[in-house]
Image (cartoon, helix red, strand yellow):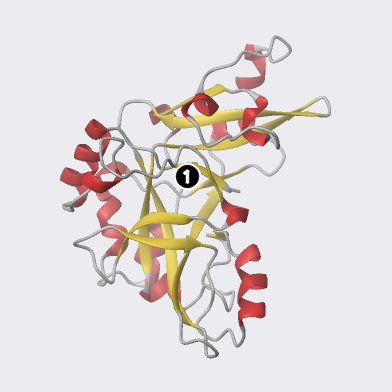
Amino acid sequence: MCYNVNQEFSEEEAKALEEEYGVDAKYISRGSSPHVHRYLLKGFAHPKLIVLADSEPSKLQEFNWGLIPFWTKTSEQADDIAKKTLNAKSETIFKLPSFRSPIKKKRCLIPVAGFYEWMDHKGKKYPHYIYPKVRPFFSLGGIWEEWTDKETGEIRNTASIITTAANPIMAKIHNSKKRMPLILQDDIALDWISPELKEEDIAALMSPYDQKKMAFHTISKLITSRNENPNVEEVMEPVEYPELSEELYV
């Protein structure tokens, strides 16, 4: 699954995103002021994700993580559903009530500098940071929805990150679930938000990303700390665990 991402971009990375997406991305770089750090966004806290949605492909927006279907009746139901819709499986996305409408009509790109996942080894979990080997960012495939709270009139834009079966290296890292986020192939990422796509076209785009384009390293347990703020640059720093041998990744 994918419940933890990094949307912290340097000025150079934001410029690359700006050029590739054709949008103004200056406000999301560390050079902007004021700037909210996004080294670690945890899904279950329902943070705002930076997205490029098909509704307004000329600008970046912020949608809460955890999709709320338009037909949800109450805020209590909305809060409960959002906990279960952080991710949407590519294999069932066209069938499930929460996702089958958005996947056809409301798709978005979610740019990330990287994401976090855990390896299970001899009863312990080891956090990893996964990021592009050459490119400045990954473009994750997502879906979004607009929900109106009938009691207050508040309109919420929310999103889910789509997941696929893991590629070989992600199956080694995320060895309990063998899942990974949908990373759109570099040269066709913007196709994801095209209104012209038919169901078979959308399905064809939902395939595991090329592992040769991915890099990774183990990180410290700061990411799960309850006493320290993990949303800092140090959360991504490499930390070695002697008990993890190279053979585990082969």
Q: Mark 1 points at which residue?
A: 208
Residue 23 position in % (x across, y down): 18, 53
Residue 108 position in % (x across, y down): 36, 61
Residue 6 position in % (x across, y down): 45, 40
Q: In this view, does 136 lie above or below 61?
A: above
Q: Quadrant of residue 180?
A: top right
Q: What element carries label 1?
A: loop
Q: What residue sits 65% from the left and 64% below the top?
A: 84
Q: Is residue 80 above or below residue 170?
A: below
Q: How crowded is mark 1: few (under 14 residues within 10 Å), some or many (20 or more)?
A: many
Horizontally, is 221 left or right of 237 in the view? right
Q: Which residue lies furthest to the right in this view?
A: 123
Q: Residue furthest top?
A: 242
Residue 160 position in % (x across, y down): 50, 61
Horizontally, is 103 left or right of 120 in the view? left
Q: Which of 220 and 178 is in front in this view?
A: 220
Q: What residue sits 42% from the left and 46% below the top?
A: 183
Q: Quadrant of residue 113?
A: top left
Q: In this view, does 24 lie above or below 211?
A: below
